[in-house]
Amino acid sequence: MQNNEKKIRLIRDKMSRIGIGEKNLDDAAILASYSINKFGQLCAVPKN
């Protein structure tokens, strides 16, 4: 598994490429809302 800094950087990169504004989200909010699946795609974290 990737460390959090690398994961956050990757998520921010993918979000900006598809046009999701990530500038106003802090790191904790990004990790709580998004993840990278095993294929390297951005996906939403399920909310319970």
Image: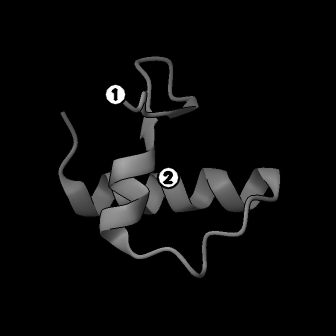
Mark nearer the N terminus (2 vs 1):
2
- Quarter of the image with the N terminus in it: top left
Residue identified by numbered label 2: 11
Q: Is residue 6 left or right of residue 46?
A: left
Question: For the residue marked with disc 1, what is the amino acid?
Answer: Asn
SS under mark 1: loop
Badge 2 crowding class, 10 Å Cα cut-off, few under 14, some 14 to 19, many 20 or more, is many
**Picture coordinates of residue 10, whole percent (x, y):** 47, 53
User: Toward which corner of the image does residue 13 lie, by quadrant?
Assistant: bottom right
Rendered residue at 58%/81% (across/down) = 24
Q: Is residue 15 left or right of residue 45?
A: right
Give the mark toward the camera: 2 or 1. Answer: 1
Question: For the residue marked with disc 2, what is the amino acid?
Answer: Ile
**Picture coordinates of residue 35, whole percent (x, y):** 42, 38
- Are the residues at dot 2 and dot 1 in contact (C-beta closer than 8 Å)? no
Residue identified by numbered label 1: 48
